[in-house]
Image (cartoon, coloured by chain):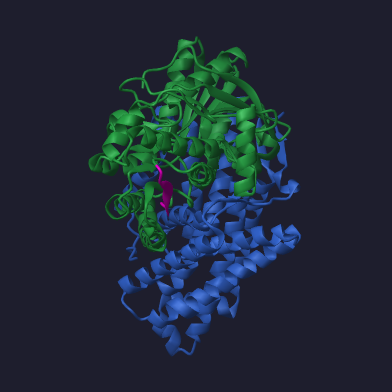
């Protein structure tokens, strides 16, 4: 293995991990953009998607069908969360909304634990997705699921870009994100826009949850917490509420995590998480609004 | 930190619920009560679950044979959720309300560290069936007893197995620095392995909960020359994934580790990638086991409905027998007397080996089984006591 192969391999690893973070962070940002709400339940919607697939495959449903159903289940979960928990308190102070979002997380997670127990269960992945590929005489390897994660992130974000810049609903969502009462005044149906935002964000969460579980090999009710935390960091680095920012933030975080281990001596890289968060703090000191929103301060 | 606090709060609520649920059953008169906190859910569930089944089996056998001191024994069981806050709540419940005379519990050192100060303060004898840090008694106090060998012993057996049987003169060391168990195990391995003449080419770390090990694996792959084997000091949930990602990257080196591997997850998650993996554990429970172990397998299968999942089932069983033996020799269900009787345990014949405590040392000297994975099945690779053991 040459030095170049090694660097390329680590770049492949970073892009693959970053795609996953970006996908979660984008969903988080869509909701934050429109509602100015940190949706902690986003991680649990991921769990719903992944569990849906695991259960359906368990009873014999073909994998691709199960994936579509899992994403749909996540979208429905997002819709219900908005309708039941968030809409009644939409005009409440930020703290109340933040706490509600935490409460939703606790409820979903604990119902999950009561129904499925918190023991991890196997996530069934078809062999074709487990296949590994190699380049440069085996020096660089990646699996089908790595490729699929990168490709799906790319395609789904292109779709999202088209949706928010080219369709009326998408433009409306951006208008509502800019100023909700003004959007209301000019005759936009704000409720409908918010529901659409939740469904889109939750479908993304479902997809991200399935890809996350595919990489992890197991699902369990608490599985949403780590990705949520990572996505949160990614979104803050990129600029909270900005979709492009979430994307960039996801890749920066993925690259940081991989490169710290890859290129620093192991005595230093064991402080990986500390280094990542130190970078985050430094970032916020220099650019309080994140990378892509240098002038706006983040309010959570 | 956020993770712990948050889990803690969830656990607190549910812990209280379960505490209420089982308190009503603990009122039966004239039984000797032994506390049994178990991490039936959460990250330790795949170890604590089978362990509890083994413990229940031992208790019912003892009771069927007339109990101890003419009384039936009763396990007062709570789910402690693999969470340190819940463990502490459950401990207060056992000590203050249930008035247990002894406590048995946990498969991991972190949980024992969470309950230790309370049992020590209340002077209630405590046996941990599965925690293996030999430092626990000196960290916590004289009420703490291990039913298993110490990590220094299993790490030494792992090192000698790698040196002699795998001919592994050089190693790559991967350590989970998120738990006490894996950190200590890794340190003990290094001491024993280097003492035996082995050389560690590279060390890397990760943290429990990580799902991507590709950066570490690429680093291992870039090593030139390649090491003879990998020692991965890992917990149950990560090892399957580490093996999978390693094999997918084209690395087919043997992997050696400790008793954290000993759960069904190793083969479930690892699949074919688990081939050429070896781990040190408490007993070999499978085809061709000794008659004593086979008798245990049959009894467990009958009571739990499935064959023992791992050696922790046998450890749970042995621990209840160990406690009952001490109560019998103490002559009264009195915690202070039971502690002294426990410390004097000698030659107690268990499924996982003979338990004897040398004066002042609450970690038994036991032999270690090395289990390997062959064709998706566990096979006994070796059984040994180490020739050199690192100081605790």
Quarter where residue B333 is shown: top left
Residue B188: x, y in percent? 43, 22
Residue at 42% in and 60% down: B25
Residue B202: x, y in percent? 50, 22
Extreme residue in the left direction = B121
Residue B108 lies, with reference to residue B369, above or below; the image says below
Visible in this render: residue A237?
A: yes
Residue B327: x, y in percent? 37, 37
Residue B110: x, y in percent? 38, 40
On screen, residue B323 versus residue B58, left or right, reads left
Residue B224 lies, with reference to residue A102, above or below; the image says above
Q: Main secondary structure of the magenta part?
A: strand
Chain A: give its colour. Answer: blue
Chain B: give its colour. Answer: green
> What stretch of residues is rendered in magenta?
B70-80
Residue at 50% in and 66% down: A111
């Amino acid at each position: 293995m040459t030095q170049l192969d090694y660097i390329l391999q680590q770049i492949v690893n970073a892009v693959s991990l970053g795609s996953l973070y970006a996908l979660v962070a984008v969903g988080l940002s869509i909701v934050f953009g429109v509602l100015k709400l940190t949706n902690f339940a986003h991680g649990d919607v991921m769990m719903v998607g992944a569990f849906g697939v695991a259960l359906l495959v368990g009873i014999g449903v073909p994998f691709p069908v199960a994936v579509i159903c899992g994403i749909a289940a996540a979208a429905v979960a997002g819709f219900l969360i908005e309708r039941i928990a968030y809409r009644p308190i939409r005009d409440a102070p930020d703290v109340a909304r933040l706490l509600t979002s935490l409460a939703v997380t606790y409820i979903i997670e604990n119902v999950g634990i009561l129904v499925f127990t918190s023991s991890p269960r196997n996530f069934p992945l078809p062999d074709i997705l487990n296949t590994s590929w190699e380049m440069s005489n085996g020096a660089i390897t990646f699996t089908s699921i790595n490729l699929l994660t990168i490709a799906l992130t790319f395609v789904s974000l292109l779709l999202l870009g088209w949706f928010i810049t080219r369709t009326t609903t998408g433009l409306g969502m951006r208008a509502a994100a800019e100023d909700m009462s003004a959007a209301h005044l000019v005759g936009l149906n704000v409720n409908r826009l918010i529901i659409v935002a939740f469904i889109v964000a939750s479908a993304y969460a479902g997809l991200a949850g399935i890809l996350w579980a595919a990489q992890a090999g197991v699902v369990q009710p608490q599985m949403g917490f780590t990705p949520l935390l990572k996505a949160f960091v990614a979104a803050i680095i990129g600029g909270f509420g900005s979709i492009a920012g979430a994307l960039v933030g996801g890749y920066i975080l993925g690259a940081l995590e991989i490169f710290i281990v890859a290129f620093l001596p192991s005595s230093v890289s064991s402080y990986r998480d500390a280094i990542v968060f130190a970078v985050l703090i430094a970032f916020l000191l220099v650019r309080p609004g994140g990378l892509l929103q240098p002038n706006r301060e983040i309010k959570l | 930190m956020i993770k712990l606090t948050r889990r803690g709060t969830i656990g607190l609520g549910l812990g209280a619920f379960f505490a209420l649920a089982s308190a009503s059953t603990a009122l039966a008169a004239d039984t000797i009560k032994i506390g049994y906190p178990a991490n039936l859910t959460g990250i330790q569930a795949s170890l604590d679950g089978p362990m509890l089944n083994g413990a229940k089996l031992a208790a019912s056998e003892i009771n069927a044979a007339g109990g101890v001191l003419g009384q039936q024994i009763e396990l007062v069981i709570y789910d402690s959720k693999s969470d340190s806050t819940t463990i502490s709540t459950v401990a207060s419940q056992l000590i203050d309300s249930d008035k247990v005379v002894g406590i048995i519990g946990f498969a991991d050192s972190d949980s024992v560290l969470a309950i230790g100060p309370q049992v020590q303060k209340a002077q209630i004898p405590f046996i941990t069936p599965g925690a293996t840090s030999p430092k626990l008694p000196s960290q916590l106090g004289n009420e703490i007893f291990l039913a298993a060998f110490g990590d220094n012993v299993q790490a030494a057996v792992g090192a000698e197995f790698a040196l002699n049987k795998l001919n592994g003169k050089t190693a790559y060391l991967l350590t989970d620095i998120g738990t006490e168990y894996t950190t200590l195990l890794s340190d003990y391995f290094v001491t024993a392995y280097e003492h035996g003449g082995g050389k560690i080419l590279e060390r890397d770390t990760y943290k429990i909960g990580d799902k991507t090990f590709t950066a570490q694996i690429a680093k291992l792959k870039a090593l030139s020359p390649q090491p003879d084997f990998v020692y991965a000091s890992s917990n149950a949930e990560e090892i399957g994934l580490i093996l999978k990602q390693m094999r997918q990257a084209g690395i087919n080196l043997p992997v050696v580790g400790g008793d954290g591997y000993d759960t069904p997850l190793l083969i479930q998650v690892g699949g074919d990638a688990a081939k050429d993996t070896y781990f040190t554990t408490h007993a070999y429970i499978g085809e061709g086991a000794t008659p004593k172990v086979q008798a245990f397998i049959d009894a467990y299968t009958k009571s739990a409905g499935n064959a023992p999942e791992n050696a922790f089932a046998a450890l749970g069983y042995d621990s209840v027998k160990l406690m009952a033996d001490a109560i019998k020799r103490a002559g009264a269900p009195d915690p202070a007397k039971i502690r002294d009787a426990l410390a004097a345990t000698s030659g107690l014949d268990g499924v996982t080996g003979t338990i004897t405590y040398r004066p002042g040392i609450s970690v038994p000297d036991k032999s270690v089984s090395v289990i390997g994975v062959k064709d998706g099945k566990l096979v006994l690779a070796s059984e040994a006591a180490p020739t050199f053991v690192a100081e605790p």
